[in-house]
Amino acid sequence: MSVADLTTDQQSLTTSSSLGENQDFAWLMRGTHEIFPDQKDSDNPDENLVQRLLKSDRPLRVKLGIDPTGADIHLGHSIPVRKLRAFQDAGHTAVLIIGDFTARIGDPTGKSDVRRQLTEADVHANAQTYLNQVRPILDFDTPGRLEVRYNSEWLSKLDLSKILELLTTMTVGQMLAKEGFAERYEKGNPVYLHEFLYPLMQGYDSVAVESDVELGGTDQKFNIAVGRDLQRHFGARPQFGLLLPILLGTDGVQKMSKSLGNYVALTEDPLTMYSKLEKTPDHLLKDYFELLTPLPLESLPENPRDRQKCLAMEVVSQYHGEAAAKQAQEAAMALVQGTGTAQQAVVPEFSLADIQFPAKLFFIVSASGLCKSSSDARRQIQGGAVKLDGERIDQVDLTFENAEVLHGRTLSVGTKRFVRLVR
Amino acid sequence: MSVADLTTDQQSLTTSSSLGENQDFAWLMRGTHEIFPDQKDSDNPDENLVQRLLKSDRPLRVKLGIDPTGADIHLGHSIPVRKLRAFQDAGHTAVLIIGDFTARIGDPTGKSDVRRQLTEADVHANAQTYLNQVRPILDFDTPGRLEVRYNSEWLSKLDLSKILELLTTMTVGQMLAKEGFAERYEKGNPVYLHEFLYPLMQGYDSVAVESDVELGGTDQKFNIAVGRDLQRHFGARPQFGLLLPILLGTDGVQKMSKSLGNYVALTEDPLTMYSKLEKTPDHLLKDYFELLTPLPLESLPENPRDRQKCLAMEVVSQYHGEAAAKQAQEAAMALVQGTGTAQQAVVPEFSLADIQFPAKLFFIVSASGLCKSSSDARRQIQGGAVKLDGERIDQVDLTFENAEVLHGRTLSVGTKRFVRLVR
């Protein structure tokens, strides 16, 4: 199984699912947890998504909302994006909604770190970072296949009478039934009134972009259903919700999350990514293949170790290309067989012997050849592209006292340039 | 006890309560159910309204909100308006808020008749009707004593980020603790989300007009407290709340209400008003005197019958002048003593003998001399000033088939011109 297979497989999806009769909707159902409403036997395109796909005489508009908080995205986040790509390949329009309006307000109570207030420039930079990260997944090039929208476009224009109208569509009881609110309210923990507006704002995004289908994790069912209600309220055809599973992390226990350390980020270097994925616990392999690759599940390698390798090769190939994936695999094998260290095998070394300490980071970045000048290095640091052992460094003037503290650490710029520092 | 006393008493209130030290705040406390916050011993003008009145170097801004729904207002509604007048007489500014914003939206769910949607023209006409009705109570003439504001001035400018900010100031639990919401929620009756915005909108009115004191019935405590919270949130000095009792109706049992028929409207003719008030049940007399007149409670007539008459005279004098009140009293006495009928005694008769039937109402109004021309009569009907037996007639082309249907009925234009129709 290789990148060649991957490409072929994606190709075949494209071909088999162009608009028309007698389609194979395997691409739609793969890894899908739930589609709602789901009247599978109905011929009514308002009740049956397959019927809507078959009977539509125009590309459907498929919505995915993202928070422009600037976080690294990981394989868990990639799942709805991959489904969005499948819709694109079937001829539909991916509508990516950048939630800039809420990000720019932040959490007005100031109680939540998650919702810290961002400037317009922050939001746009973060959106760009997001788009860069999902570039290997989505089709950015075919005309009409991707629409990127900022929700401040419509939310900033809402006035009080429109907002009152949005609020009339729901009762307090319905809102308090939402997961998250219910428990807090029962326990006597405060639920602030403005929190009730967020699901309605997300729902109004569906009205504004005329969404036919909204993708999301299983935790998004309530919000997507609010979107349906609002569309109906405003006389539009309600969207379908397509829910995707929340991915378990590489520990095989908890959901993939940066804070739990059980994640694989899309921007990780090939060897790191490969090494994490080739240890994927047995019981996760089926889900990972189904959700993260297009490989046919019935023809996977029989040997569990081979399945792990196959998964790692496939995923690394998606983000770094087949050559880098093969190189990472070889390095990892060398490491396992004791014929070298991972770093030696794929990561070039840079000796700090000629550097005068104390030394500024940007100078080391430049001297190592990762950037072509000190000023370029400064820019890369400011842009958040420079990492030490995978941790982003954003202090331009960071200074190191001696070579010892850097020995053995990996310095990288972007996802493809890295050196291992040696004293 | 007469109108002369009334005038003297108001005069003395004015004199004794001009801004300065050593004031007598009897006018403030009279009939007042509660002032909050109420730290009576405090010297801090933020905790003690009397201190704020004493220490302020400018007139205070005293807010009263009204719904421009066009309803006839009755003596129950007059209570906070009378208190507003007392503040005016003490040198302060009455700020009447016309709630046009919400009236123009109506109840977006369409479920409530109370909140039917009104046009801008409706709202302005209704506001004018309201002002006409309270004209006998308030000081419209002294410069700086009255400010009439429409809340669409600021509410129509609120955008989503400002509304989110308003919503952050309260929790769901706090809102559900409000009388009216709590019971409905407990019983499983729907409470719609937009209903949570109304108290915040009323509260934001206080921010917008920089209110120092808000007047209202005891049922307004929650909303006035929301205004305090919002003012504090926006860095302004929080207002005081001054709560006034809800008046019981002339039946002595239920609160005064048009729908219960136990009311005295401010626009009723002198005899009707007098006749209702001179039957005021004994146990209501103290409240009615305290809330509806400025008379000293310790020097009321001892005989209960005299007290009823005194009350009726006082109140009718306020709205129709002393002469009309005396005439009404005489007519009522004649009626009781069997020396005449009420209508004969005070209401001039108009004979329909010369009218050709079927006849249009506006023609009869004009022919009776109540209006100086048919076109004037049409205008008065359109303006809602024409009543038959106290019921407003607003069909300009209303036609009567014969004199029989009109015999014995009272036709009036405004509050001071009326005739009794005889065939």
Image (cartoon, coloured by chain):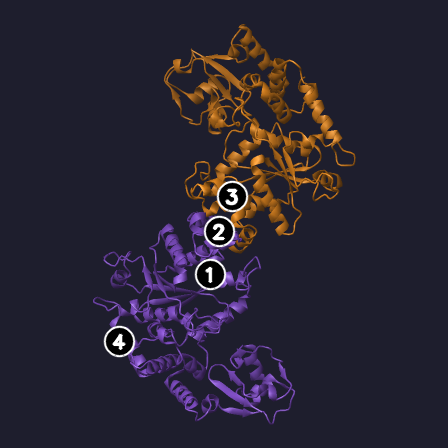
Chain colours: A purple, B orange
Q: Bin the neighbour count of mark 3 within 10 Å (Cα to Cα): few under 14, some 14-19, many 20 and up.
A: many
- What is the quadrant of residue A11 in the picture? bottom left
Chain holding disc 2: A
Helix, strand or loop status at disc 4: helix
- Amino acid found under the numbered disc labelled 3: Phe
Please name the residue that numbered disc 4 is placed on: A298
Helix, strand or loop status at disc 1: helix
Q: Is residue B328 above or below residue A220?
A: above
Q: Bin the neighbour count of mark 2 within 10 Å (Cα to Cα): few under 14, some 14-19, many 20 and up.
A: few
Please name the residue that numbered disc 3 is placed on: B101
Q: Bin the neighbour count of mark 1 within 10 Å (Cα to Cα): few under 14, some 14-19, many 20 and up.
A: few
- Amino acid found under the numbered disc labelled 4: Glu
Q: Bin the neighbour count of mark 4 within 10 Å (Cα to Cα): few under 14, some 14-19, many 20 and up.
A: few
Chain holding disc 3: B
Question: Do marks 1 and 4 share a chain?
Answer: yes
Q: Depth-wise, is mark 1 or mark 4 nearer the camera? A: 4
Quadrant, the C terminus of chain A? bottom right
Please name the residue that numbered disc 1 is placed on: A153
Quadrant, the N terminus of chain A? bottom left
Please name the residue that numbered disc 2 is placed on: A186
